[in-house]
Amino acid sequence: MTDQKSLPQRIRAHAAEKPDGIAMREKNLGLWEPVTWADYWDSSSLVAHALLSLGVEVGDRIAVHSENRREWLFCDIGITAVRAATVGLYPTNPAAEVLHVLADSGSRLIVVEDQEQLDKTLEVIDELPTLEHLVYLEPRGIVGRYDDPRLMSWEDFIELGRQHRSAHPDALDARLDAGRTDDLATLVYTSGTTGPPKGAMLTMGNVEFVLETLQSGEAFINPPASEKDVIVSYLPLCHVAERVFTTWFNAGLGVQVTFAESIETVQQNLREIQPTILFGVPRIWEKIAAGVQIRMSGASRLKRANFALWMKVSRWIGRTLVERHGQHTLGTKVAYAAGWVMLYRALRERLGLSKVRYAASGAAPISPEVLEFFMGIGLPMFEVYGMTENSAIATANVRGRVRVGTVGEVQPGTELRIDESGEILTRHAGTFAGYWNNPEATAAAIDADGWLHTGDVGEWIDGTHVKITDRLKDIIITAGGKNISPSEIENSLKASPFIKEAIVIGDRRSYLTALIGIELDTVGEWAQQRKLSFTTYRDLSRKAEVVELVQGIVDSTNSRLAAVSTIKAFRMLPKELDHEQGELTATQKVKRSAITAQFSDDIESMYTKAGR
Amino acid sequence: MTSTRLRGRPLVRTSYAQDMSLLNTPAKRRSTILIIIVSFLVPFIVTDDLLLVLTLGMISAVGAIGLNLVTGYAGQVSLGHAFFIGLGAYTGAVLGGDTDASVTGYGLPIYIWLPAAGVVAALAGLLVGPIAVRLRGLYLAIVTLGLVFLGDHIFRESRSLTGGPGVGRRGPDLVIFGIDLEESGVVLGLDLAREQRQFFMALVFLIIFAVLGRNIARSGVGRAFSAIRDRDVAAAVIGVDLTKYKVMAFAMSSFFAGVTGALYYAVVGVFEPSAFGLLLSVQYLAMVLIGGVATISGAIMGALFISSLGRISGEIAHVLPFISESSSGSGLLSVFQLEAILYGVLIVVFLIFEPRGLFGIWTRVRNYWKGWPFSY
């Protein structure tokens, strides 16, 4: 193979071309330590050699269970370099899900971050006959306490690679350059809102398609991202979206990656790094917007007045931009310039968004209110759409042609159509190879003509933009026979900073109801300002005042909805939903079936007591 | 690519040196340059009598920085600062003074008498330092207070060196690089009056000593001082040698005091032993407290403010009829009484309402804008 197109080959090319250029940074003891392209390729090739010395064959699966850090990328590149496939696990996956993923994928080796993740694997290791080695990154709590013979430290693992490299210096290049586009690159496990997670197979060819699409300059960012761009990597790398923005943007376009210290410190890290490209799921954007409200409510009178004034202006700017698809008028430009001096510049700097030239939201629907907020303070914000099964390439809003409420235009090189039932179908070279060990599900997802059935219901807006209504399986059909999209209502509720979760219920019922979970931070602050004392989440959400607050939000949402889709009653969730307990998926999506089963009493009570 | 830094992102630290550097933020770099440029323009804007006040203020600032090292950074309350200033003043006056006068004088140049003034004071500081190792807080304050009275007595009695009470003597001659700072004339193509020349000299010395003080404060020595201030036992436990650093604090602080003494009275001219009483010590403590404890810029602000108090009370006297402008004049108060009152009131007000001093006010203003548009 002569062209250097595959992911590991691109890293090798970067290393040869600009060995001292900085590929990524990670914070260690307060300092952002750079990793050069030469370091990157060197470490990745050591991982690859270590895998070769352990006898890893083409097509084997190697799992990685860690937070985002440089070793994740070293492993990803090293694994694909020996033509094996990377299986990512969410750091929040409980042992049961770890078992499912490892057993289903038949992983031969797992790289775990620390004792916490190691314990999860060891808990279920007896049911994993294929797992031969465990490599840990952080020795703390492990060294001297665990005596499993399959255990190996990262240093020993790398040392294996070093020995193998000096003994067989050409082995890796030979393996890598024999790579084919139908080699399995990675198994991305879907979050599994309905059943157990399924492993979507992405091939090297799929990845190359994505890299080329990114490079073409027409997809996502215009002008295309380059080495001057900086990205903060903080969402789980096993999810396809973060893989695109971290690994693939980096490998394809040389974008510098900085790793957030943890999901809790993202806001501080954003402020330090001031990235130029930022991807977030709606939950992150909602949280940032809610954080602004909380901090503002504690500000001095003058600052509050200043904020209120310029937010009013920004809403007007946002609305105008929304109407004009993201294009400024002279009026908005002047207003924005004044607001920039008084508020927007400082606000964006404080949020770590001052240098962002491309902000994207995806992976779940975002409410237009949140988009408007960010567009109003001058953030070039775009909603994009894609899924694991089409390598995250489907549609995106582009500069100057933004339509809020839609997921944008079809990406170049992508075919998209909406069938009779309203389901969105896509077709391009990035369409996945199928679900691992699951031919029935594969057959259901890809039809004979190569069209991927996304499972999302959508419609065309003006023939150019796609609007997603809901997941096909989530559509509620009321007893009266009306089709209602719950996510639209849920997002409208969640646009309030006080509401974290909203689950609309009403399938085969005569009217709609909802389960609502409050946002502890904001409601807690709200309660404090009113001198309401509370102890726990449960206690707070039961307060009559809080129920009244939520009632107000529900009422204002209802006023914007058609009569059939109004919420007639609601109940407060007594606890924060949790991944560990199987109420949320690893990507924080609600598992409806689990929730409706768990809170069936509450739900029934809303339908028996005559209205409310 | 040679630099590992991320351009335009000052918060991204890639080395600890960056964190500890003298001017670690772009805002500090810009404002410092601006302040220095403005300071050099001041002599061409302000009248000569006010210039003299500022000159003396800047020289006092050097001493205030010194006191801040021992009291602010190292937390050792010293009331003996006047003694060290006196030592410096007389060392300077004797070494640099007129050879023909009735009191001893050797007529040596400034590059001998100025360092010597600092060194002699520092040596005295070295002697006092060990006392501080055994005492702290109030007890240390009392012992250093004793130092002032000892000094007062010695200065009064050494008539051949100090001229004695009521008589006094002249300070050293201020001649730097052949330029006599006590005359007016053309320097480097600029026609400069005596006050303007002295102002420039004081400004240069202040910059040198402020940078020196800041460097001490941000180095390992400075951090050891802070550790001792915050908890001496804890500092000793983590390996700070208490004896060494307390003695060092006194020696360094006294060096600054010595330099101030020599320069101050060179500019003032004639001075007598009674100047180095307890009041002077308290005045310097006030500069530190009003300016801001454990900050260099605070010490400078405090020194300039306290030194201008005389001038400020004079201005008030112009406005308020019941204050006479001389000590013997009719009226409820004289300017000197007003000055003393202002001075006491200021200390009380600052300690109660703004314990972090003028610097604290500045910090609040800065944080208000730094936090914009939030409050925290």
Image (cartoon, helix red, strand yellow):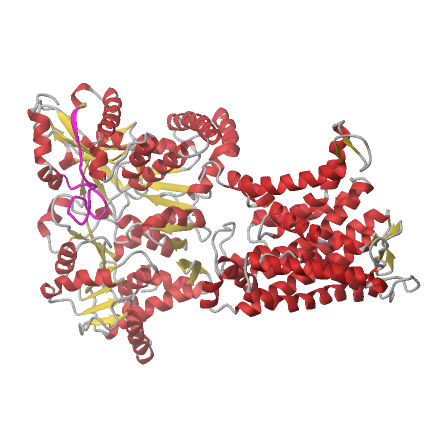
Residue A141 appears in the rendering: yes
Q: Is residue A13 left or right of residue B250?
A: left
Dividing the image into 4 quarters, which one contains the C terminus of chain A? top left
Q: Most extreme residue toward the bottom, as rendered?
A: A167
Q: Is residue A108 left or right of residue A158?
A: left
Q: Position of residue A71 (x, y in %)?
A: 32, 62
Q: Position of residue A248 (x, y in %)?
A: 33, 54
Q: Residue at x 53, y 33 (%)?
A: A341
Q: Is residue B247 left or right of residue A497?
A: right
Q: Is residue A386 above or below residue A405?
A: below
Dividing the image into 4 quarters, which one contains the N terminus of chain A? bottom left
Relative depth, front residue between A463 and B228: B228
Q: Position of residue A105 (x, y in %)?
A: 15, 59
Query: Is residue A50 within the magenta segment?
Result: no
Q: Is residue A474 above or below residue A559?
A: below
**Which quadrant holds residue A165?**
bottom left
Query: Is residue A569 within the magenta segment?
Result: yes
**Which quadrant holds residue A208?**
bottom left
Q: Position of residue B143 (x, y in %)?
A: 62, 61
Q: Is residue A548 above or below residue A520?
A: above
Residue A357 appears in the rendering: no
Relative depth, front residue between B146 and A168: B146
Q: Magenta region, mostly helix, strand or loop?
A: loop
Magenta stretch? Answer: A568-592
